[in-house]
Amino acid sequence: MDPLIKTHESYNDYYKQYRASWCRKTGLPMYSRKEFETIEKEGLYTITRAKRCKVQIDTTKVCAWYRRPNGYAPMFKETNNEQV
């Protein structure tokens, strides 16, 4: 099952957020502002936060969901771009 599929069941087009019922079905962790320390420890970023922090993320694999006012946003792991 692709967690980022945008159907009426999974995605709210008006708010541009994923629905809670869909996020629960994926079985991925669901975080809110209260768990921010855990989010930072695991290196998870939403697309917006990654752009703001200038961090590269792997957007091919959703690792968790982050609670927003009108739904959930996908979270991704930071990629390690180590240059020698």
Image: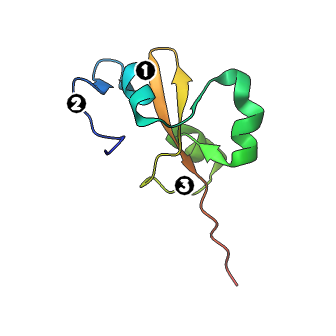
58 lies left or right of 32: left
Q: Toward the viewer: 11 or 15?
A: 11
Name which residue type carries label 2: Thr
Question: In the rendering, at what x and y percent does residue 29 appear?
Answer: 56, 34
Q: Give whichever of discs 1 and 2 has the lower sequence position.
A: 2
Residue receiving disc 2: 7
Q: Nearer the viewer, mark 3 or mark 1?
A: 1
Q: Give whichever of discs 2 and 3 has the lower sequence position.
A: 2
Residue receiving disc 1: 20
Q: Secondary structure at mark 3?
A: loop
State how far apart marks 3 and 1 are (Cα): 23 Å
Question: In the rendering, at what x and y percent does residue 42 appear?
Answer: 70, 47
43 lies left or right of 13: right
Q: Give whichever of discs 3 and 1 has the lower sequence position.
A: 1
For mark 2, does the 10 Å Cα neighbourhood hold few (<14), some (14 to 19), or many (20 or more) residues?
few
Numbered mark located on residue 57 in the image: 3
Q: 45 above or below 69?
A: below
Name which residue type carries label 1: Ala
Quadrant that contains the N terminus: top left
Name which residue type carries label 3: Ile
> What sort of colour scheme is used for the picture?
rainbow
Q: Secondary structure at mark 1?
A: helix
Residue with the most extreme bottom position: 84
User: Would you say the residues marked 3 and 1 are in contact, meaning their CB atoms lie under 8 Å apart?
Assistant: no
Q: Nearer the viewer, mark 2 or mark 3?
A: 2
2 lies left or right of 51: left
Task: Identify which residue is drawn at 45% across, 15% down.
Answer: 70
